[in-house]
Amino acid sequence: MLEPLTAAAPLRVGEALIVRLTLRTDRALEYVHLKDQRAAGLELISQVSGYRYQGGLGYYESPRDAATNFFIGSLPKGTHVFEYRLRAAQSGDFSGGLSQIQCLYAPEFTSHSVGQRLRIGAN
């Protein structure tokens, strides 16, 4: 069962976290790079790169040490959701990274999210 993270119910070491990125675009785009940086206290559950198909959209997902990259050849107009799983590895107060998106061949089409704080409590 999915539960939102709140100050009253922080994430605990060992618990799984699902990262959900919601992307809204008002036009069709091509050759798009979406980079989601993660907080230091989190570890990837699946570390395998590969082509994924989710919600009618095909893309290449490339998890790395500090971020997960999504490469999208053709992004249609509309709302798209990207998800991946992480596990809380150590307790503390961490700075969550930004999510950045940019067209590779038209860099003037770019955007980013706000950063967030993430508290992970000990068991």
Image (spheres, rainbow, N blue to C red):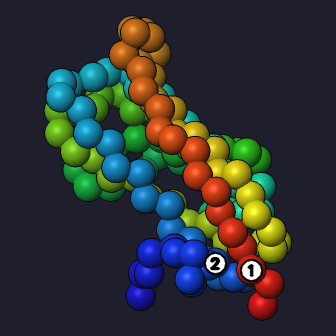
Quarter of the figure that contains the N terminus? bottom left
State the residue at coordinates (81%, 73%). Answer: 91
Question: In this picture, is 43 found above or below 22?
Answer: below
In the rendered image, the vertical position of residue 3 relative to residue 109, given as above or below: below
Q: Residues within 10 Å of mark 2 (few under 14, many from 20)?
A: many
Side of 87 relative to 81 (left or right): right
Residue appearing at x 74%, y 80% in the figure: 121
Could you classify mark 1 by the number of other residues whose Cα lies within 10 Å: few (under 14), some (14-19), or many (20 or more)?
A: some
Mark 2 and mark 1 lie on one chain; the one further toward the N terminus is: 2
Callout 1: SS: strand
Identity of the amino acid at label 1? Gly
In this picture, residue 39 sits left or right of residue 91: left
2 and 1 marks in contact (CB < 8 Å): yes
- Pick the residue in front: 16 or 61: 16
Rendering coords of residue 56 (x, y %) = 23, 50
Name the residue carrying label 1: 121
SS under mark 2: strand
Q: Quadrant of residue 11?
A: bottom right
Q: Quadrant of the C terminus?
A: bottom right
x, y percentage for residue 81? 33, 52
Place residue 39 in its image quadrant. Answer: bottom right
Q: Relative to the observer, which residue lies in front, 10 or 100?
A: 10
Counting from the top left corner in percent of width and height, residue 87 is at: 67, 72
Q: Nearer the viewer, residue 107 or 58?
A: 107
The type of residue carrying mark 2 is: Leu
Q: Which residue is mark 2?
A: 11
Placement of 112 over or under 3, stated as above or below: above
One can see residue 96 in this view: yes
